[in-house]
Amino acid sequence: MQISVLVALTLLVLIAFGFLTGRRRALSVRAQGGPRLHSLPNYYGYYIALWTGGPALVLLAAYGAFGSGLVNTLAMSQLEREAAPLIAEFERQLDADAQIIALLEEAAEADADAMEAREAITRARDSGLDPQAFQGALAGHTTRLTEIGARLDQRRGEIARSVAARAPSSDAGIRARSGFEFWNSPRERRELFLADARAIAFGEGLASRNTPELRAAALAMRPVEDIFRWSVAALVLSMAVGGLAWGRSRVKASFRARNRVEAAISGLLMFASIIAILTTLGIVFSLLFESLRFFASIGWRVGDFLFGLQWSPQIAIRADQIGQSGAFGAAPLFAGTALITVIAMSVAVPVGLFSAIYMSEYASKRVRAVAKPILEVLAGVPTVVYGFFALLTVGPFLRDFALFLGYEDAVTQSALSAGLVMGVMIIPFVSSLSDDVINAVPQSLRDGAYAMGATKSETIRHVVLPAALPGIVGAVLLGVSRAIGETMIVVMAAGQGANLTANPLESVTTITVQIVTLLTGDQEFDSSKTLAAFALGLVLFVLTLMLNIIALRVVQRFRERYE
Amino acid sequence: MAYDAQPAPATVYHPAPAGMNIKVAASDLSVRYGGALALDRVAMDIPDRSVTACIGPSGCGKSTFLRCINRMNDTIETARVSGSIRIDGEEVNDRSIDPVLLRARVGMVFQKPNPFPKSIYENVAYGPRIHGLAASKDELDAIVETSLTKAGLWKEVADRLHQPGTSLSGGQQQRLVIARAIAVNPEVILMDEPCSALDPIATARIEELIDELRENYALIIVTHSMAQAARVSQMTAFFHLGALVEYGPTEEIFTNPRDQRTQDYITGRFG
């Protein structure tokens, strides 16, 4: 840690020195009355500073990103080599162990039985018989398989422990045990092992365990890390010095430092946008691949997912569940999202648009100066506050009102209360953006309409709004995408029931809410239940993408240019 | 406020030439924007069926004067108009006058072409529609065609009436706007620097058009180009610092100005 701070400080000093020396050199060229400098002296300074800092910082960044992984791999592969005798012994014993051989035979048997039962189920279905008996048998076989697997793991663990125990408790023996433990761990355990070892070696966080094996691994990591650190530090500094010397050697009166700095700046800006694009791509791909895993886990019945009418992911954890195909039907979620969005927009669009028209066309400057910030305060209210407003105030009010009107099934958590409050939340987005575009309509258009003898509201309806339409459409679609993506209000105020209904007084649930429920709490990460969240996320992404494309098309279609 | 200290402007005032009807008559007309005096006690008789040009340096009040005639100053919150302006003897500033109806009688064309975000047809049909001038679709079609023909645009747009008005070139847009103003059959047409955003060829077309329109309407145009004023107008008014300095037949103003300031401006000594 201290080395890297030192390196960073030295680098900064070198960069500053590079800047000053470049500047000074340029100034001295000028003072000698030589040919006119191409650029201002500062640019020569920037140029040298760029050469000093640029390559060195790239190397530092690469070390920061990949350094510790490299250290881990090198240290652990050394330990694994030392554990070679133990590994050989373990494999020999596994092959010779009678219990394991018996278990493997049993597993093969159970597997064959399960296969048979599956075929029987298919046959029964094809011939129109009730496959229930076979389904029971299949469940039995699967349970047996799981049990055998557990026993196999247990026996393997016993053998591994006895092999490890046979290693001497000398340093070399412990190193071998450490390498063996690492070799014998599944992927997630390996990551935990490495994290613990690093915690012990370098104090990076807290170790979950502290065993002799981990300490041995930590000891093995330290020298590798030290060599790495020192060599990277030396390399960084020599690159900085080399860059400085190279930059300095190029400073001449005719050298176009200004243009070079310009190129470096455009490179930097491009780099920033590439990061943004790559991040987006990364998100899209991670969504895509996890969704593919999900679709694979439900047997590629994408149609059932998109159009299925029953959403009950909680009961579909076991792989061979009966009626599993119906459990991931997301149509109720899409319907719920659409219902709440429609309710929210039918509040937000008229109120937002009309208030924008009032603010920009009718309100006096003084009213506007007060009212606009107040309206925008709405945008600053945290959504969770809207959520409990919906849950504790609007929801009960609507329920009581519905009961009063004689609707007896009224509930507190309804699509209507969530949608209404969400609409209020979206008002400022619609009004603020619409206000801006209405103000951007040139005064000459209004004058033209007034000069034709149009009244104020005629001018607004016939001329101002059509001219502002692209922007208003944009504002509305922005509001829609907020409504689709809004989670907190719906979690709190719309209930959780995946009801397929168009009745706004019932509970509904949305895509986002289900993503939250699927991914929070204790979850196994490779069950189709959890993976379903990614598929929902993908749908959400595609939905908003399509909205944006439609918005762009609409805007292009109605666009009028006023230069 | 400094203006207030000055004596009443020595307006060199020529009555309209004999034999011409007075269409617009201003007297003692002043306009204030907030505290600033933009137009100072202007008196002027504008003849019918002729072109009157208002010239003068920027900020001299000529546009303000124009906007008094169709009460466009009403749309500016801080504007205060006093004095009298009459069209055919009828007081424009009178409370009984509905500005919306007044503006149907007084068309206006602005500096920058400002076609509405509608088709060419709808742009021209807009005025007749809101004032209910056409009883049927055929009648409306006829109004659109006559107006576009009068504005010299019909031949160019007859086959694309339903394209957006903004798809036309700048000069065509300005003629479209003139057609739009003509469509409500006004008596007076005000033009506020109608050619300043146009190229010389488009300007020549508009000037020709102004000359043709003179047969049916009283035209008042504000222009920065003295050459244009000399080419198209019969009467010229020279404004300076909010006051009308000199007003008379164009020929006289340009060949024999009576006020020193007029002479200086015309000969390019200031402006």
Image: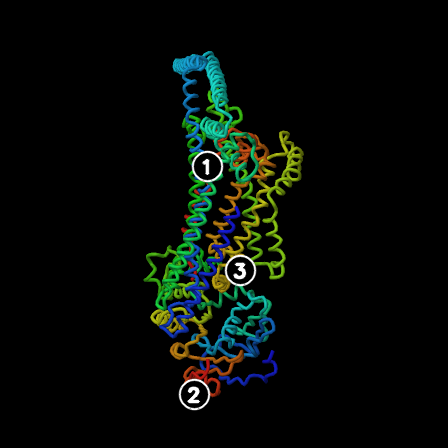
| Residue B139 seen | no
- Amino acid type at circle 2 is Asn
Say the numbered circle drawn on residue B256. Answer: 2
Name the one closer to the observer, A24 or A327. Answer: A24
User: Colour mode?
Assistant: rainbow
- Check residue A72 in the rendering and tell me which mark sits there, or answer none: 1
For mark 2, name the chain: B
Subunit ID for the residue under disc 1: A
Task: Give, as a three-letter code, the residue at label 3.
Answer: Thr
Tag 2 secondary structure: loop
Quadrant assignment, res A344: top right
- Report, in whole angstroms, how far the alpha carbon at label 3 lies from the one at label 1: 77 Å
Q: Nearer the viewer, residue B23 or A29?
A: A29
Residue at the farthest front position: A170
Mark 3 highlights which residue?
Answer: A455
Whether label 1 touches label 2, CB < 8 Å: no
Q: Position of residue A137 (x, y in %)?
A: 46, 12
